Image: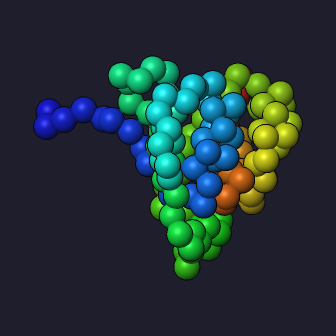
Amino acid sequence: MIGRWHGLIIDCPDPSALAGFYQELLGMQRVYEEGDWVVIGDAPDRPGVGFQRVADFTPPRWPDPAHPQQMHLDVRVDDIEQAEPQVLALGATPLPGGGKTFRVYADPVGHPFCLVWQVAG
């Protein structure tokens, strides 16, 4: 092992707002905030998700390869029918695609993410 995972950093136009979206989605807390930088996580000494302000941010366009997604999160849920209205209320937008065990959404600035669940049977 060369190192340990420290965090995932997401470019965005408003770090505080996007961090708030993911705090609610993932049940994390804000562990660091300074200027154009916000980090959320389980605790300050554990890996987290960081949000950095980027001037002239260009959002990805799902599934357009000319504006690639660059990264996405898979978020496991127990009940998709319960989770979907909650993420939509937070500001997520449904995207085309998905399958038997996942649905695709965009966060408030356009980054794709999936709600993933285990289908019984």
Frontmost residue, 91 versus 56: 56
In the picture as drawn, the residue positioned furthest to the bottom comes out as 66
Frontmost residue, 81 versus 120: 81
Q: x, y (%) of residue 14?
A: 62, 55
Q: Residue placed at 68% from the left, 40% from the top?
A: 21
> Can you see residue 37?
yes
Counting labels gives 0
In the picture as drawn, the residue positioned furthest to the left comes out as 2
Q: x, y (%) of residue 61?
A: 64, 69
In the rendered structure, the answer to whether residue 111 lies left or right of residue 49 reads: right
Q: Residue placed at 66% from the left, 38% from the top?
A: 20
Frontmost residue, 79 versus 25: 25
For the C terminus, give its image quadrant.
top right
* Quarter assignment of residue 25: top right
* Quarter assignment of residue 81: top right
Q: Residue placed at 69% from the left, 31% from the top?
A: 24
For the N terminus, give its image quadrant.
top left
Q: Residue placed at 55% from the left, 44% from the top?
A: 73
Q: x, y (%) of residue 60?
A: 60, 67
Decide: is 66 above or below 117.
below
> Can you see residue 84?
no
In the rendered structure, the answer to whether residue 62 lies left or right of residue 37 reads: right
